[in-house]
Image (tube, rainbow, N blue to C red):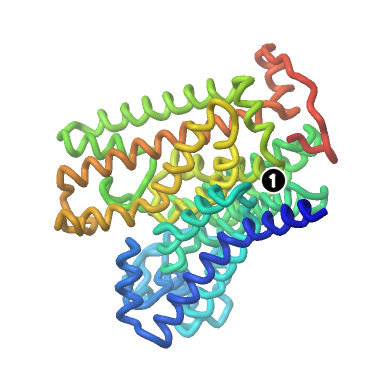
Amino acid sequence: MESMFLNVTGRRARRLAPPLAAGLAFLLLALLYVAWNRPLYMQIVTAWGVRPYIYPFLDTETVLSALRCLRDGVDVFVSNPCDPRHRIFDYSPLWLAAAPLPVTTAWIAPVGLAVDTAFLLSLFLLPPGRTARETAVIVAGTLSTATAYALERGNNDLVIFVLAACAASLVCRSPALRYAGYGLAFLAGLLKYYPMALMALALREAPKIFGLITLAATLGLLIFIAIERHDLLRALFLIPHGSFFSDMFGASTLPGGLAQLLHLKHRFAANLQRLLVLAALVCGGTIGLRAAFAADLAALTAQERVFLLAGALLILGCYLTAQNIGYRAINLLLILPGVTSLSRVGGRSWVYGLSAGLIVLLLWAEGWHHWLSLVLGAPEGPAALPTPPLVAAWGVRELAWWWVVTLLFALLCGLLNRTDIVRITHERLLGLWRPRPMKKKEGVLF
C-alpha cells in the first residue's frame, strides 16, 4: 500500500513539475516587468535568447490591431497602420470574426496574459515523465527559448498548442469527448492551416466513424473556403519568408542556406529539398513499419502515443510546408514525454535518448545561437552575415531538425500502421497487409 501511494505521489509530482516550473518562471518575469525592475527583465529575456520588444505581447497586438483597423474600414490584408510595426495581417480570416468586439489598445495585456495562461495550464495535460531524469528533460523543454519567445510575444501559436493538447487529451476518452477533440483539431486547422493535419487523429477510429468525421470536416472546410475564399487566398500569399540563417526553420532552410553560401541557383535548393524530404520519408517509413519499432511503441501508454501522434502531425505539417519562426517549435513539447519514455526501451534506447536530447537542443536553438554570438562577438539579427562558427552551428541545428523529422515520420507510420482504415486500404489497394490481431477499446485502436 505504501509503495502504491509513493508511486501515485511520484507520478503526480512528475506531471506537475513542467507546468509549475514554467509558471513560476513566467510569474517571476512578470513581476520583474510590472513591479520590480523592468531593465533587469529585458536583460534576462535577452540572455534567454529572445529579442524583446519595448512591451510584451507584440504578436497579440498583431491580431488586435487588425481588428481595430478592420472596424475602421481598413483592408488589413493590404495595410495595417494600427499595428506598431505596420505588419500586414497574414493570418486566417477566421481571426477577424472577432471584429465586432470593442477592441482597444487596453486589451493587449489582458488578452496576452489570457493566451499565455491558457498555454501554461495546457502543460498540465502533457503525459508525465516516468522517472525524475525524464521529467527533468521535459522541464528543460518547457523552460526553453522557444517557450519564452512564444510567451513574450503572446503569439497565436500558443492558442494552436492549447487546442492540440486539449484535442490529444480528449481523444483518449469517451466517444462524445473524442468528437469534441476532433472539433478542436478542426478549429486549430481553420485558424492556422497546418494544424489541419491533426484531423488524422481520427484514423484511430473505426472506419465508419472515421468516414463520418472526414465527411463532416470536409463539408466544414468547403463552407469555410466558400465564405472566405477571397481573403483566404490573399492570406496564403502573405505567408512570410525569412533568412535561412535567422530563427526560422523548415524543409527549405538547409537547401536554401547551402545554395546561398555556395552561390548556387535556386534550382539546386529546390532539388536538394525534394531529395531530403524523400530521404526522410523513405527512411522514416522503413523504420516505422518494422515489427521492432511497433514493439517499442507498444510499451507506451495510450496517452503517450496520442500526444506523440499529435505532435508528429503538427511538426511535420509545418516543417514540410513552410518556413516557421522559432516559437513554433513549442509543438515539440507534445512529443517529449513519449520520446523520453521510449529511451527506456531495449537496444534502441540510445536512438530515442539522442532524439530527446536533440529536441531539447532545438527548443533552445535561439538561446545557444545568442550565447555563441556573444562569445564570438558576432553581430545578430536578420541582416547579419553568418560567420564560419555560426554557419557550423547552423548546420548542426539543421541536421538535428532532419533527424527529428525522420523520427517523427517513423513514429507517424508506426502509430497509424495498425489502424483498421490503414489495414483496409492496404488490403484493397496493395494486397500487402498481413495484420496481427489488435485490441479495441470503445472502437478506438491503440
Q: Is residue 77 above or below residue 287?
A: below
Question: Picture quarter containing residue 18?
Answer: bottom right
* Most distant residue in the bottom direction: 35
Q: Is residue 323 left or right of residue 16?
A: left
Residue 331 in sight here: no
Residue 170 in sight here: yes
Q: Position of residue 362 (x, y in %)?
A: 40, 47
Residue drawn at point x = 70 percent, y = 49 percent:
182
Q: Quadrant of the C terminus?
A: top right
Check disc 1 and report its element: helix, strand or loop: helix
Q: Is residue 182 above or below residue 99?
A: above
Q: Position of residue 311 (x, y in %)?
A: 56, 45
Query: Which one is in front, 431 or 312?
Result: 312
Q: Is residue 131 left or right of residue 39?
A: right
Q: Position of residue 183 (x, y in %)?
A: 70, 53
* Most distant residue in the front direction: 2
- Residue type, numbered disc 1: Gln
- Residue where numbered disc 1 is placed: 303
Residue drawn at point x = 56 percent, y = 56 percent:
161
Crowding at dot 1, Cα within 10 Å, few <14 / some 14-19 / many 20+, comes out as: many
